[in-house]
Image: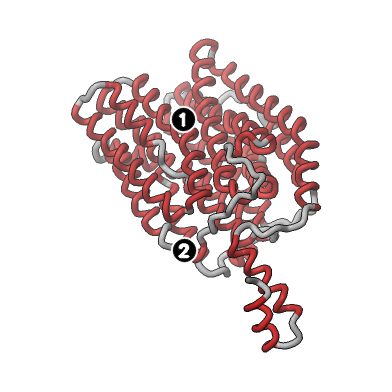
């Protein structure tokens, strides 16, 4: 299994940008949990802490695609420093307001502005796509990135809680701001692997790519898939509290990530010829069906066993969705489209956690699982409904003639074609200098 992943890093610059990207994406889950922990410690109001942390998460889910949209138009090196700077300054202002007892509205304002934090997972995936577009290695890269996402969402919150409880309340958001600054500072200068800015064709729309049917349907599928993961978070806490030890909830989170990570790595090592829309239906079907055993769970150990199986379908489904997006979204909207997928997932996790928490408080622990089962059913309905449309889009894309995406690529294609047809090396030099003007 290790060989396909080792081969990924044979391309120049891949180790450097993936390492910097990992450092820069860890602050995202750290910031949410850090804000929650900080405000619960400094104000003693859990409701306020949850609302402010939720404001940050949903702000990032909305603003992240807007940042990525500008990245598609201007390039990573021009946009990421600005977006990062605004986010870090706003996060610093949030820490200051929480420390000095500033008015409550300031907490929401700066949490909202902190949501300009760029989606580094999408930035990294965009670079992998540029390097391995149309090659089997791209599926392996997407699989690895899904596992990295799982890793950051396991380590980030745990690290945030540890820092803010062991050191001082503001430690976790402060560390998130520093990690983001350093990670982006290391990521941006790597120009060799940065995707080029692609010019739109004359008939291309300037509207957001979320208006595209494939992107919208896939983002909604991930929204409801993420709601299952959010429900797992809430139910893990609920069962652990019932057994008198909240620390046991960490076992549930870790096992879910472990199941997803193992299956993601295995999936990335496979060479599959099955059409992606069919794999999407299979993956979402498995995800929906594995929510049913939740009804049989009676303790943390039982839940850990069930969520491990549920996690097995999660990462491969995410990989398939990213693969479909890469093949159906316009090249000049790719980063934005990838970011909408991540935003859909993040919003779903937050929504699932919130709704299941309300249901548990009102009707008891057992009914909380109804949220996961309902979300799985809706995700499956979306996958079944969108599969025929996705098949048509993919077939149309595969049969369409390849076109250069910007002036540099057009020049390169022209030179390569004419040089290939020239009878010898000296003629090739003459042809490439004249024919491509």
Q: How many marks?
A: 2
> Is residue 28 shown left or right of residue 288?
left
Q: Which residue is mark 2?
A: 191
Q: Quadrant of the N terminus?
A: bottom right
- Residue 51, how many percent across, how many down? 39, 23
Q: From the image, tell me which residue sits under label 1.
A: 58
Point out residue 284 in the picture as x, y percentages from the top left corner: 70, 35
**Quarter of the image with the C terminus in it:** bottom right
Residue at 40% from the left image edge and 35% from the top image edge: 32
Q: Residues within 10 Å of mark 1 (few under 14, many from 20)?
A: many
- Residue 235 appears in the rendering: yes
The Cα atoms of the two marked residues, 1 and 2, are separated by: 31 Å
Nearer to me, 189 or 182: 189
Closer to the camera in the image, 251 or 128: 128
The relative height of residue 72 versus residue 230 in the rendered view (above or below) is below
**Residue 208 left/right relative to 98:** right
Identity of the residue drawn at 73% across and 27% down:
381
> Residue 383 location, x and y as percent?
73, 33
Q: Are marks 1 and 2 in contact (CB under 8 Å)?
A: no
Say which quarter of the image contains residue 86. Answer: top left
């Amino acid at each position: 299994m290790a060989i396909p992943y080792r081969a990924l890093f044979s391309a120049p610059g891949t180790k450097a940008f993936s390492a910097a990207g990992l450092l820069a994406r860890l602050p995202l889950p750290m910031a949410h949990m850090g804000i929650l922990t900080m405000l619960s410690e400094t104000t003693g109001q859990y409701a306020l802490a949850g609302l402010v942390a939720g404001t940050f998460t949903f702000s990032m889910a909305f603003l992240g695609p807007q940042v990525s949209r500008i990245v598609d138009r201007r390039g990573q090196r021009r946009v990421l420093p600005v977006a990062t700077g605004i986010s870090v300054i706003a996060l610093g202002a949030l820490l200051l307001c929480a420390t000095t007892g500033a008015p409550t509205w300031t907490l929401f304002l700066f949490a909202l502005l902190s949501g300009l934090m760029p989606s580094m997972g999408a930035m990294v995936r965009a670079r992998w796509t540029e390097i391995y577009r149309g090659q089997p290695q791209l599926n392996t890269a997407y699989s690895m990135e899904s596992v990295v996402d799982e890793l950051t969402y396991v380590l980030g919150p745990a690290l945030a809680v540890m820092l803010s409880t062991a050191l001082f309340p503001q430690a976790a958001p402060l560390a998130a701001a520093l990690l983001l600054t350093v990670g982006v500072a290391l990521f941006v200068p790597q120009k060799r692997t940065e995707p080029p800015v692609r010019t739109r064709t004359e008939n291309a729309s300037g509207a957001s790519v979320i208006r595209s049917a494939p992107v919208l349907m896939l983002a909604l599928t991930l929204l409801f898939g993420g709601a299952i993961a959010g429900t797992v978070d809430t139910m893990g806490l609920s069962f652990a509290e019932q057994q008198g030890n909240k620390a046991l909830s960490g076992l549930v989170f870790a096992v879910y990530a472990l199941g997803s990570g193992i299956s993601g790595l295995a999936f990335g090592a496979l060479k599959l010829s099955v059409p992606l829309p069919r794999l999407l239906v299979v993956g979402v079907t498995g995800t929906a069906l594995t929510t049913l055993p939740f009804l049989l769970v009676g303790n943390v150990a039982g839940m850990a066993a069930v969520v491990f199986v549920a996690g097995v379908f999660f990462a491969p489904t995410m990989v398939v969705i990213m693969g479909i997006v890469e093949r159906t979204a316009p090249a000049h909207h790719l980063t934005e489209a990838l970011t909408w997928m991540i935003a859909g997932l993040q919003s779903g996790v937050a929504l699932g956690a919130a709704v299941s928490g309300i249901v548990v408080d009102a009707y008891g622990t057992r009914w909380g699982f109804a949220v996961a089962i309902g979300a799985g059913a809706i995700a499956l309905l979306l996958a079944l409904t969108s599969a025929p449309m996705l098949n048509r889009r993919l077939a149309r894309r595969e049969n369409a003639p390849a076109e250069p995406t910007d002036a540099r690529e057009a020049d390169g294609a022209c030179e390569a074609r004419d040089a290939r047809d020239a009878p010898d090396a000296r003629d090739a030099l003459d042809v490439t200098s004249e024919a491509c003007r």
